[in-house]
Every structure is written in C-alpha cells, then in structure tokens.
Image: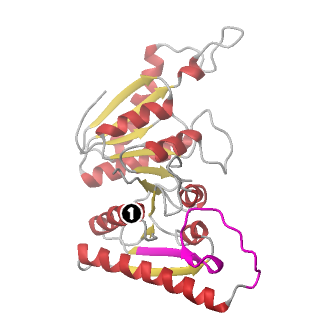
Amino acid sequence: MLSQSGRIVVGYDGSESAGTALDWAAAEAQRRRAPLTVMHVLDYVEAAPGPLGVTPWGDLSEELISQVAAEGAARARKSAHSIEVGVVVERGQVARTLIEAAHDADLVVVGTRSHGELGAAMLGSVSLAVSSHATCPTVVVRGDSSLLPGPSRPLVVGVDDSPGADVALRFAADLAAQTGARLIVVSGYQPALLQVWTGMTTTTVDPQPDPGYVADSRCVAEKVVAIATQTARNTHPGLEVTEQVRQGPAAAVIAAATYRAGLAVVGSRGRGGFSGLLVGSVSHRVLHTALCPVAVVRQTS
C-alpha cells in the first residue's frame, strides 16, 4: 500500500462510472499537484468460484488483474501528466479496502456504481459505504460530469447549525477560494417544524401550516445561512458568496441548487442524525439526486 501525505485515491474497476471518477480525480490531483493512486480492488466474493467452478471474472491471473489498474493509470497520466500516478492492486472487500486507504489520503474519489452494481438511478453500495465511513473527504462523481468547480461552475454547500455542517462549510470555502468558484450557501426549511435541515424524516399534519410558523422557519434558515456566509467571507476575504434559502425538504433544496455546479458539499450528518447513521438522510438523498459530483465531509471528532 502506498502511503503518501496529500495523495488522492481513486477507485477504478474499468467501468464507465469509475472512468468518470478517474477523470475527475486526475484533474483534481493535477490542480493540487498531489500524487494520485489508482486503486483496483478485486472483491473476494466476486472472485470466488461458482457452482461450476467458474468465476464471473474469468481468468483471474495477476497479469490481467493488474492490467485494469494499469489502464486506469495510463488514462490518468494523459490528462494529469505532471503529477505522480501510482497503481495499487488489492484483493478483498472493495469498500473496506478503499476506507482503509483513506487513512493515508487527503481525498477518496469513487464513481456511483461498480461493475457488480446495477440500476442507473441507484447509488452503489461501495460509494455509499465509502462516503459513510472514510476518514477523509469522499467525492462521489455522478453521471458524466468530470469538470471541477471554477469561475464558470459554482460550488454548493448545504448548511444547518450542526458541527458537521461547519466542517463541510470550511471544506467548501477553502475549495471555492482555491478554484475561483462562486460559493452558494444553501439551506431548506420545513414550515411545520420550526427548524432547518434536521436530517430526519418528518410528517406535516396540517396541510396549511400557520403563516407564523412559515415566517419563523424561514427566519431560522436565513440566520443560519447568513452566519455561514459571513464565516466563509471572514476566512477568505474576496470570496464571492451567494445565499439561497428555499422552502422544502433540505435534500431537494440542495439538489436543485446543483444545476450547472461543479461540486456539492454536504456534512456526513446534520442535527437530527443518529450516532450509527454516519451519512444522514439529507446527505444520502443529495448523493442520489445532485446534478454534479458530491463531496461528503465527515466530522472526525
């Protein structure tokens, strides 16, 4: 296993989704001038012989297994020609191996689905597990978008008043300042609850909530966004920051703001998260519905 400070690790299995993630990771490594590790993990479950003694992967010679990672590294070097690109090949459980690699990385990048995962609209189990448990920020690259945030592609961050949102805001503000991207600070509110982004499923009993509740809920959300905006500007004077407060489920509000964005950033858990649910329901839904890559930033303490 390579151990390099500041490196980016990208999971690659030769699939279309992984290829898009690889392109994004290579571009980000080039921007940071950071080493890139292309990691191919052959899942021991998928490699196990079937009832007829045949594996789904056919000939599992070391040469063929290594070829997948080598092809990924060659693809990365075409666009990130001035950085170090390393190759790691492992046998094991894919998500666990990538999570372990995150301990020595600054960023882990994955696609939405691997070869063994089906469903165009579904987030793969590997992507969800890695974004839930990696100790460093994880970027899940959705669709065919491999472009980084920049002057023409804003960066979106979802906020509430939780410590997890504070960590996400710092990550987003730093990246926006580095890339010259406009930072969009977003929060949604639910009128009947008098709170913003709880991360919990709720039910509105009254189909016509009290107008006072609506006003109070919006006021709370606006205050949260205003504080986050000021924090970002204090940290990075001159950073272009805009605010968005919309009525509706937080995940839907954040996802709607990602149109033409370069990256969305969410914390791993909002105020309503449970201790065992490392990716809260809002973050989980944004991973499924955002129109751009999504970075999940965990609070580590």
Q: Is residue 57 magenta?
A: no
Q: Is residue 163 left or right of residue 282?
A: left
Seen from the viewer's position, the closer of residues 199 and 251 is 199
Q: Is residue 220 above or below residue 137?
A: below
Residue 177 location, x and y as percent? 28, 69
Q: The residue under label 1 is which amino acid type?
A: Pro
Seen from the viewer's position, the closer of residues 108 and 260 is 108
Residue 37 location, x and y as percent? 33, 36
Report how many numbered discs are placed on residues in the image.
1
Q: Is residue 270 above or below residue 247?
A: above
Residue at image mark 1: 163
The boundaries of the magenta stretch are 184-208
Q: Residue at x 43, y 75 (%)?
A: 184
Q: Quadrant of residue 188?
A: bottom right
Q: Residue at x 44, y 54 (%)?
A: 296
Q: Is residue 206 magenta?
A: yes
Image quarter in which the N terminus is found = top left
Q: Is residue 90 left or right of residue 234?
A: right
